[in-house]
Amino acid sequence: MADHIFQALMEEGGDMAGAFAYTIYKRHKVEWTVQYMADHGGQLPDAAALDAFRTMNLLPHALHGYLERGRALSQQVLTMGTEKKINEIKVEVALGALAAAMKEDVRRQFDERKTVRGWMRDAVTGVIANMVALLIIGALILGAKSLDDINAAVSRWAKGEPAREGGVGQQPAAPGAGQQRPGSGAGR
C-alpha cells in the first residue's frame, strides 16, 4: 500500500513536488510510529494499525495536504537555487565589467605611450630621475669627505697636534706667506 501512496503523490505532484510530498509522508509515518510505540508500551504497530494509517493517508484530503507542503518545499528549493544562480550571474557580470574596464585602461595607457608625446614624456621623466639620483649621490660623497676632514681635524686637536694648513676652521694662508724671497734670509 506504500507504493500506492508514492504513485498517487507522484501522479498528482510531478517529479519534484511529488518526491518532496512522499518525503513528508515518510517523516509523518516515522512520527506516527514513535507516538504509537509510546502509547502502546514500546510495541511496534501491528499490520492492522499500519493499514489504518495508510488508508487514512490515501484519502484525497491527506494526499492534498502532502502535495501542498511538497509544492511549497519544492518552490522554496527552486527559489533558493534561483537566487544563488542570480547571485552567481551578478558576480560573473561584475567581474566581466571589471575585466573590460581594466583592459580598456591598459589599452589607453599603451596607446598613450605609442605617441611621440608619450615617448618624450617618458624620456624626460627618465632624464630627470637620473639627474636627481646623481645629485643625491654627489651630495652623499661630498658629505662623507667633509665628515672625514672634520673627524681628522678633531682627532689631531685631541692629540695636541697642530692643525694642518687649510684644515677645517683655519683661514687659508696668504699667497707667498712662509716663503723666503730670493737673496734674503739665512743664506747670507
Image (cartoon, grey):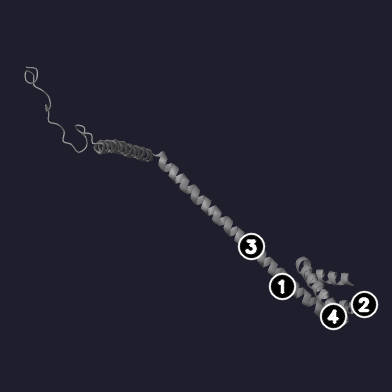
Q: Kindly identify the amino acid type of the residue bearing the numbered disc 3.
A: Lys
Camera-side mark, 4 or 3: 4
Q: Kindly identify the amino acid type of the residue bearing the numbered disc 2.
A: Asp
Q: Kindly identify the amino acid type of the residue bearing the numbered disc 1.
A: Ala
Residue 160 position in % (x across, y down): 23, 36
Residue 150 position in % (x across, y down): 26, 38
Q: Identify residue for label 3.
A: 84
The residue drawn where x is 44% and y is 46% is 108
Instruction: Report helix, strand or loop for mark 3.
Output: helix
Labels 4 and 1: the sequence-earlier one: 4
Q: How far apart are marks 4 and 3 (CA)?
A: 43 Å
Q: Which mark is residue 46?
A: 2
How busy is the neighbourhood of tag 2: few (under 14 within 10 Å), some, or many (20 plus)? few
Q: Identify residue for label 4.
A: 38
Q: Can residue 82 be seen in this view?
A: yes
Q: Nearer the viewer, residue 28 or 58?
A: 28
Left or right, 133 with reference to 36: left
Labels 3 and 1: the sequence-earlier one: 1
